[in-house]
Image (spheres, rainbow, N blue to C red):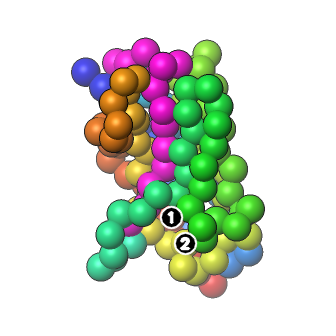
Amino acid sequence: QVQLVESGGGLVQPGGSLRLSCAASGIIFRLAAMGWFRQAPGKQRELVATVTRGGTTTYGDFVKGRFTISRDNAKSTVSLEMNSLKPEDTAVYYCGMKPYGKDVFNSWGQGTQVTVSS
């Protein structure tokens, strides 16, 4: 059974930084694409960043060079380094997994709250 556990959320001031981590189990991690998504109150879940099993990354347009996604296949973890945080980055951030051979992300962590406020 797939399990994704996020950590690293919290309260940060505008312009600050946070690092989110997601530990995966129950999958052949190196074969899966991984991603971070977020959902703010009253809004739909949106893509933040993804990384393929080959290491290719994609980012949401709003990221604009502020965030970096990375994966460690040896540890079965995926991380999101977030810099220059803005109040509009406030949301619950979810780790997602797309299994090898599938077209969609179909497993999710429980989410971690990120609040950007002074």
**30 sits left or right of 28 in the view:** right
Amino acid found under the numbered disc labelled 1: Val
Disc 2 target residue: 89
Where is residue 93? Give x, y as percent. Answer: 45, 57
* Numbered badge on residue 75: none
Cα distance between the residues tagged 1 and 2: 8 Å
Q: Residue at x 68, y 57 (%)?
A: 67
Q: Residue at x 42, y 63 (%)?
A: 46
**45 sits left or right of 33 in the view:** left
Where is residue 56? Give x, y as percent. Answer: 64, 37
Q: Compare residues 17 and 72 and report the one nearer the observer.
A: 72
When the figure is inspected, residue 110 is found, relative to residue 71, above or below; the finding is below
Q: Residue at x 56, y 62 (%)?
A: 60
Check if mark 1's residue and mark 2's residue have beta carbons within 8 Å.
Answer: yes
The answer to which image quadrant residue 85 occupies is bottom right
In the structure shown, which secondary structural element does the residue marked by tag 2 occupy? helix
Q: Which residues are magenta?
A: 26-39
In the structure shown, which secondary structural element does the residue marked by tag 1 occupy? strand
Magenta-drawn stretch contains 77: no
Disc 1 target residue: 114
